[in-house]
């Protein structure tokens, strides 16, 4: 687990381990270099809410009966891949919908796709964060228009 209190979330990585990694950076490096590592994100806040709060990770109306946006709780699931841009090109060619392509938004080199039910899946690099000039949706690394940061 790695805590990000400044952004009000924690990430939990599910990956095979051979030895404990005592520092935050060692844990991060291990997970980002392990094939098939799964990232789970917990957004702070649900513990202070009354009643049941469930979040699909989309901050939208997915899964709600009343049409109101969900809040708090589960953030999203993430997967590591050898090359984010190559993986996203494949997802795009298969018709997978994107919430954020690798070059859109403020963070370059990672993406968010949607599964068939509309839930978010983060696509992260195994190893170093690489940024290519143009991504699968034609978004240049300089600019990155078309992505709205819903965390604010």
Image (cartoon, helix red, strand yellow):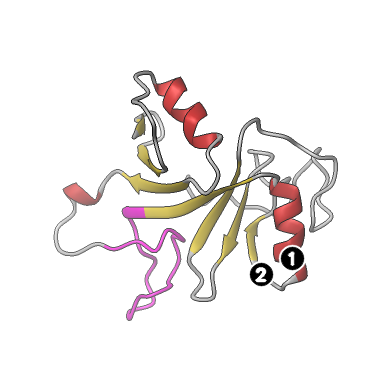
Q: Are marks 1 and 2 in contact (CB under 8 Å)?
A: yes
Q: Residues within 10 Å of mark 2 (few under 14, many from 20)?
A: some
Residue 23 within the segment the image draws in magenta? no
- Quadrant showing the N terminus: top left
Front one among 152 and 4: 4
* Residue at x 60%, y 39% (from the top left corner): 126
* Residue at x 62%, y 33% (from the top left corner): 127
Magenta region, residue range? 54-74
* 116 with respect to 1 (left or right): right
Front one among 52 and 87: 87
Which residue is farthest front? 18
Q: Residues within 10 Å of mark 1 (few under 14, many from 20)?
A: some
* Residue at x 19%, y 53% (from the top left corner): 49
* 69 with respect to 47 (left or right): right
Residue 142: give x, y in percent of width and height: 81, 38
Kindly identify which residue carries mark 1: 92
Which residue is farthest left? 50
Kindly identify which residue carries mark 2: 96
* Residue at x 17%, y 47% (from the top left corner): 48
């Amino acid at each position: 687990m790695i805590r990000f209190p400044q952004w009000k979330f924690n990430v939990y990585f599910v990956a095979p381990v051979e030895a404990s990694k005592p520092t935050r950076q060692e844990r991060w490096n291990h997970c980002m270099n392990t094939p098939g590592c799964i990232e789970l994100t917990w957004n702070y806040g649900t513990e202070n809410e009354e009643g049941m709060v469930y979040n699909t990770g989309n901050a939208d109306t997915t899964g709600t009966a009343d049409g109101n946006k969900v809040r708090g709780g589960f953030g999203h699931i993430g997967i590591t891949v050898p090359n984010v841009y190559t993986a996203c090109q494949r997802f795009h060619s298969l018709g997978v919908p994107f919430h954020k392509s690798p070059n859109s938004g403020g963070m370059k080199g990672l993406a968010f796709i949607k599964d068939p039910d509309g839930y978010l899946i983060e696509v992260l690099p195994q190893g170093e964060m690489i940024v290519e000039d143009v991504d699968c949706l034609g978004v240049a690394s300089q600019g990155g228009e078309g992505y709205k940061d819903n965390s604010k």
